Each structure stands twice: as structure tokens, then as C-alpha cells.
Image (cartoon, rainbow, N blue to C red):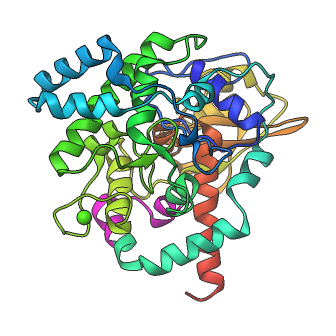
Amino acid sequence: MGTTLAVHAAESSGQTVTVKSQAVAVKAKADKTIKTAKRTHVNKHKRPSKARPATNLGPAYATRPEVMRFADELAERRNLDPQWVRRAIGQATLVPSVVRLMQPSTQPFIKNWAAYRGRFIDATRIEAGVQFWKANQATLARAEKDYGVPREIIVGIIGVESIYGRNTGSFRVIDAITTLAFDFPATHPRAAERAEFFKGELEQFLSLQNRMGADPMLPLGSYAGAMGMPQFLPSSWARFAVDFDGDDKIDLWNSPADVIGSVANYFKAFDWQPGMPTHYPVGFDNAKLDLDALMAPDILPTFSVASFTAKGAVLEGPALTHKGPLALVELLNGPDPASYVAGTENFYVITRYNWSSYYAMAVIELGDEVKRAMKDAGR
Ligand SMILES: [Ca+2]
């Protein structure tokens, strides 16, 4: 729930935010908020209001004995030079704005798909997507062939995450992650768990930088330490990033090919099914509608076409012959009527990148818009 509150805080203030997670179970909830039983990673990127938040830094962590103890233990676990680890973590500084951004909102929040969509899908982002697609046609085709993930989904993700590399974050990653590992806001309902999570990210980050022979003080990312064009946290980088341009390095900041391959590999790892649509239109037959039953599993695809339609969902065309389970996905529109789609298992896979059906729908629709713009231009 804490993460949900953070999302709400960001959305209500009009900033963009994404939250990555892995869920093992999703169950009913009165307000239809998606919730997950387990999260393995989080990726948030709120844009700092100032260009460089690093102007207001707290003390360096070298003065904190428990932090230096952690550095020594990390060095031992990972077989790293303890002085190198101490120096890296010791030079990291507490960033008060990172703590503030992670604090749960005190404002009431009203979900609004139309408003959310408008923040991610506009002429500028679509045109940037067209340029990205044109520049990387062959790589996108190769990723689609190798991983089975459609190019428009890959293009949608990279656009929503960073506008194709234009917004990759301006916090020093080591500062952000160390701050969240040792000064996670205590007002957060799951502060202890989240702090442990970011200790794991700090360990992954230093291991990665060491392996790459890179200076851990240099990388910049989101306020939660998400990095590069796909906004991967260090743990996602370690697990899913691939070298897709064959230069024996993985560079998610500067190599569009590595980014494209890594995003596709991420989806394949979460069981993307080639050829399966992400969702279908859905209507309702009010005479037999059991909305509570349809909403109970939230976005976890659970219903066969037969049981879905028996409960009053109305499908048409190819949806009627869909083989796998479906979920009723509800997108609230503030004071206006909610939007609904029938989500497939592939819709669910997109929410493994980011814990939000609104996010998944924005990714899908941005990818579709870019694809349409490519077609319209005859490209
Ligand atoms: Ca590479």
C-alpha cells in the first residue's frame, strides 16, 4: 500500500511516477486499487522540480558507523575491496528530497485514466517515438524475432519511462539508493521492508559498477535509483539486461540496441506470450452483470471466456475465441464513468514492469499511436 500511496502523491501533484513490482497474488479490494502480495523491485521517477536536486545534500554516510559496517559486510559477501566499497558508500550523501518524494501522500487522490493518459501520450512523445522507431527499425525487428515481444510494446515502454532517453533522472544513483537504504521515511507503512529492499539495490549497484570497472559516483538516475532509457533498477539490470549490439558491454544509457534487447528480455522472462493481444474491448449485459465477481481477482487474469461472459461481460470478434484467462481491468476517470477492457495474460505481464494498470494501458496506447504515426507517414 505504501507504494500505492506514493503513486497517488505523484499523480495528484501532476508528476510522473512509475512503480515496478512483481506480484504473486492479486485479490479483491473495494476501491479496486491494484495490490500485490510481493514486490521485488520498485522504479519510481518523479521529476525533480529543480534541474539538480544535489544542491541540498545532507551529510556523507562515512560518518555513520552502521553504514560503514554494512559496507564491510557487503564487501565480504561480494568479495569486493572493502576500501573501495567504504569509499563509495561513504561519499554518498543523504538527499532530503529523495526522502520527501518517498513519503506517503496526505492528500486524497482521485484516479483519472484520461488525465494519466494525457501526461504520457502527446504529440511530442509520439514524434520522439517515431524518430526512435525509424532509427532502430532493424534492432526492433530482431528483438521481436528473438524474444517474441512486439516492437510497439518495446517502443511504448521506452517512451513512457524516459521519452526515449530524454529523461533518465538527475539524482546520483549512489546517493538515492543509499538514502533509501538508511534513511527511508519512517512515516511509510512498510519502511523497514523498503529499506531492506534498497540495501539489496545498493549491493547490486556496487557489484555492477565494480564488474564494469565503472566509477560508482557517476551514474545519475531517478529518485529511486532507476537507471537509463528503460529505467532499470540495479537488480533488474543484473537479472534482465543484455548486450544486444554485440560490443561486449551493456549500456542502458547510450545503446538503444541494448535497451531494446533488455526490455524485450524482461518481458520474455515474465512469460510474454508471442502473438497474444494485450486486451480486448468489453461491454456489459446489465441483465446478468455480476460486477463484484468480475472485479474480485482485480487484474489477475482468471476467467475463461465462458465464465467471463456468464457473469455479464460482453465480448466480440476475436475475443470470443481467446484461449487463455481474462481479467476485467477498470480504469477510473475521476468524476466521469470508468473505462473497462478485458485484459489478457500479456496485459498482466506489462504490469510486472510497473505495478499499475494505468501504466500498462499508457504503454500499450503510446506504442499504438507511434505505430499508427509510422504507418500514416508511410514509414
Ligand atoms: Ca552493448
In the picture, the quarter occupied by the N terminus is top right
Q: Is residue 206 visible?
A: yes
Image quarter for ligand 1 equals bottom left
Q: Position of residue 248 (x, y in %)?
A: 16, 63
Residue 238 vs residue 364: left or right? left
Q: Is residue 323 visible?
A: no
Q: Residue at x 42, y 54 (%)?
A: 228
In the rendered view, tell whether residue 260 sits above or below residue 345.
below
In the picture, the quarter occupied by the C terminus is bottom right
User: Closer to the camera, 206 or 290?
Assistant: 206
Q: Residue at x 66, y 36 (%)?
A: 329
Taking the view exactly as shown, the residue that stands out farthest to the bottom is 378
Q: Position of residue 330 (x, y in %)?
A: 71, 35
How many numbered discs?
Answer: 0
Q: Residue at x 55, y 31 (%)?
A: 98
Residue 193, quarter of the rendered image: top left
Q: Is residue 150 magenta?
A: yes
User: Closer to the camera, 248 or 342?
Assistant: 248
For the record, the magenta segment spans 142-155
Q: Position of residue 360 (x, y in %)?
A: 58, 46
Residue 49, quarter of the rendered image: top right
In the rendered view, tell whether residue 210 sits above or below residue 119.
above
Residue 375 vs residue 226: left or right? right
Mainly helix, strand or loop, the magenta region? helix
Q: Is residue 51 magenta?
A: no
In the rendered view, tell whether residue 87 sits above or below residue 5.
below
Residue 281 vs residue 246: left or right? right
User: Closer to the camera, 89 or 323?
Assistant: 89
User: Closer to the camera, 42 or 304?
Assistant: 42
Q: Residue at x 61, y 39 (%)?
A: 357
